């Protein structure tokens, strides 16, 4: 039963992350819902293998981000460069939401510090479900107020076209490097040095802010 719950909540987590990716960049969510559901199932199976079967949960975010980029590329048909950016912004957005939800749940006594490090358990499930619900609310808010960026054309992309690494695209290429490093290292710090969450949060927020700023700049054709 624990495995079923883990899998279902992991699918919900993945849908929340992909929803943020699609909403921030104005990709058509419902048009690709079947593909998104397939992506979520694949990501959940891989997450279970990494966390439970292989027993290396610290690698989960790195593996998941890489997987999302590949799934965006081969299932949603997004070119590789936009996939790197879309994947990073979506994943960092969800991570930032978790970093806000998690301390609030601790302060209110709903969960404990140990719940944030656990793979399964009631407290862990509460953190997941709350983060997912907040993510969906954020997506609804952005949709309702027509927020987001159209700096990347909606998929499927024409793979014969190449992304020129000049101007804002070049800045984005440079900015995605530290963002990926943050994604790859965040879960390690959370699982092994929980007290450092106040250090990790600013790096997540700063990386997300820079990518959002550059996306806005690109949206205006700068």
Image (tube, helix red, strand yellow):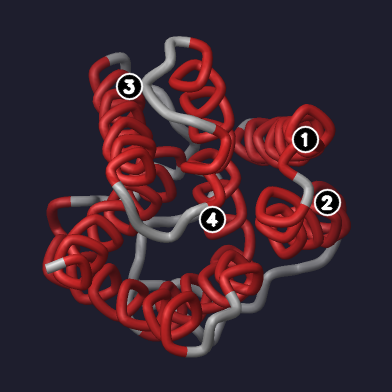
Mark sitting on residue 195: 1
Q: Position of residue 22 (x, y in %)?
A: 36, 49
- Of callouts 3 and 4, the N-terminal one: 4
How crowded pointer 1 is (Cα within 10 Å; few <14, some 14-19, many 20+) is rated as: few
159 lies left or right of 190 = left
Q: CA distance from mark 1 to mark 4?
A: 30 Å
Q: Position of residue 89 (x, y in %)?
A: 58, 47
Residue 147 appears anywhere in the view: yes
How crowded pointer 4 is (Cα within 10 Å; few <14, some 14-19, many 20+) is rated as: many
Mark sitting on residue 86: 4
- Of callouts 1 and 4, the N-terminal one: 4
Which of labels 1 and 4 is toward the front?
1
Residue 222 appears anywhere in the view: no
Secondary structure found at label 4: helix
- Of callouts 3 and 1, the N-terminal one: 3
Mark 2 vs 1: CB contact within 8 A: no
Q: CA distance from mark 3 to mark 4?
A: 18 Å
Residue marked by disc 3:
146
Residue marked by disc 2:
175
Which of labels 2 and 1 is toward the front?
1
- Of callouts 2 and 4, the N-terminal one: 4
Mark 2 vs 4: CB contact within 8 A: no
Which residue is depicted at the point 81% across and 61% down?
Answer: 181
């Amino acid at each position: 039963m624990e495995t079923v719950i883990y899998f279902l909540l992991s699918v919900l987590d993945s849908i929340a992350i992909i929803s943020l990716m699609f909403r921030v960049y104005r990709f058509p969510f419902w048009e690709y819902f079947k593909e998104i559901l397939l992506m979520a199932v694949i990501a959940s199976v891989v997450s279970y293998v990494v966390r439970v079967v292989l027993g290396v949960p610290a690698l989960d975010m790195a593996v998941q981000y890489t997987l999302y980029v590949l799934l965006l590329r081969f299932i949603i048909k997004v070119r590789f460069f936009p996939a790197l950016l879309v994947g990073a912004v979506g994943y960092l957005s969800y991570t930032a939401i978790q970093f806000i939800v998690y301390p609030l749940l601790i302060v209110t006594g709903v969960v404990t510090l140990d719940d944030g490090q656990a793979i399964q358990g009631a407290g862990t499930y509460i953190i997941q479900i709350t983060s997912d619900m907040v993510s969906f609310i954020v997506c609804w808010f952005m949709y309702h107020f027509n927020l987001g960026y159209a700096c990347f054309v909606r998929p499927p992309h024409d793979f014969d076209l190449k992304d020129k690494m000049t101007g804002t695209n070049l800045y984005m290429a440079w900015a995605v490097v530290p963002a990926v490093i943050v994604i790859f290292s965040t879960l390690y710090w959370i699982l092994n040095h929980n007290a450092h969450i106040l250090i990790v949060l600013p790096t997540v927020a700063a990386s997300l802010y820079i990518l959002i700023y550059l996306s806005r700049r690109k949206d205006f054709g700068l």
